[in-house]
Image (spheres, rainbow, N blue to C red):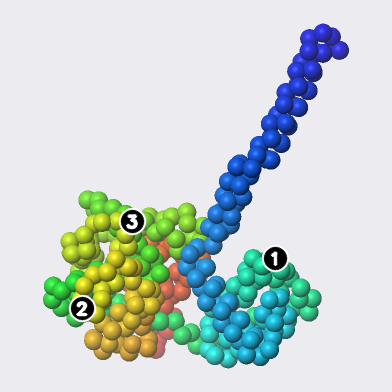
Amino acid sequence: MNAVEDAAAATGRVAGTTAAATTSTALVQPGGLVDEIAAARSYRQKAKAANTLRAYASDWNQFEAWCNERSLEPLPARPEAVATWLAALAMAGKADSTITRHAAAIAWYHRRAGEVAPQHRDPRGVIADTLAGIRREQRSRPSARKAAITAAQLKAMIAEAEGEGTRAIRDRAILALGLAAALRRSELVALQVADVAEVNEGLKLTIRHSKTDQEGAGQVIAVPTGKELRPVKRLEDWLAVRGRAAGPLFLQIDPQGQLTRNAMSDRSVARLIQRYGAKIGLDPETVGGHSLRAGFLTEAARSKASLAKMQEVSRQKKLEVLLGYVRSVALFEDHAGEGFL
């Protein structure tokens, strides 16, 4: 090694030692470590969407109460106890997706408490087998999915929201926008005023979180002005009443008809749809929050919209779901027996 190489090596050793010392010092600095721990805790709390955490809390409270009534230990819970709880939910008529979420909530609460989730200490697989059995049984039954509300039906429902009162104006906007943007009820109530951007062609809606976007990457939906349902005009009318101050787009209205500053609940949107559906002769039991989204996809399929364009609005990750709407609409088109039956 020549003199130049000796100097470079020495410099590297000193630099490496200095860097290591600097890093070590930074890690043991009380203020820095406290801030970093707080940041780590904050990021952990953001790992789940707020709606998911609320659902998990409700699920856990139910499981805990069920265990207490039966003198079972909820934390740590035995796999057999969890499997029995999931079976009880199925007996109560809960959907397999809801039951799966209950299982996830139990696992999450165990991890948060520093315990191994029951699913990970279940060598006999009783939890997995119970869930598989529930799914198999439920999927063999006729679907209980809420019926689609067509554009014509929605137009009639909007007409039932008569007058220029605050509630009527808000309800017309919810109905029109819900179908026009193929929104889930949770997405409708999560919208903020800042999520609405007016453009020449209509609106751009930013959906910050959704069932298929749990990380909150955000998605933008185009909403045309429209000639029949006129979602843009309905929303403009509502904003003229609500005002454009920051906050939830769709606000609760108190019994006296006064606006609050609180966002509507997703359940209240479902009830709103059922109420107006009943006014035009629909069975309230067959329609709900999903009916507007299903209505958009049904009408889009009927209008021969491409799957890509349908997916652009609905944001479905699985094309099979969209194909289901297309097949349903096209059942009698070019039927194999049309020429001889």
Q: Residue at x 26, y 82 (%)?
A: 276
- Residue 317: image location, x then y, percent: 50, 63
Is 30 on the left or on the right of 199, as rendered? Answer: right
- Residue 75: image location, x then y, percent: 68, 76
Give me the C-alpha separation between circle 3 and circle 1.
38 Å
Identified by mark 3, the residue type is Asp
- Please tell me the numbered disc located at residue 217: none
Q: Quadrant of residue 221?
A: bottom left
Identified by mark 1, the residue type is Gly
Farthest residue to the right: give it.
1
Q: SS at mark 1?
A: loop
Check disc 1: other Cα within 10 Å, few if <14, some if 14-19, many if 20+: few
- Residue 226: image location, x then y, percent: 22, 63
- The residue beneath circle 1 is 114
Check disc 3: other Cα within 10 Å, few if <14, some if 14-19, many if 20+: some
- The residue beneath circle 2 is 256
In terms of depth relative to the viewer, which is nearer, 320 or 42? 42
Identified by mark 2, the residue type is Gln
Q: SS at mark 2?
A: loop
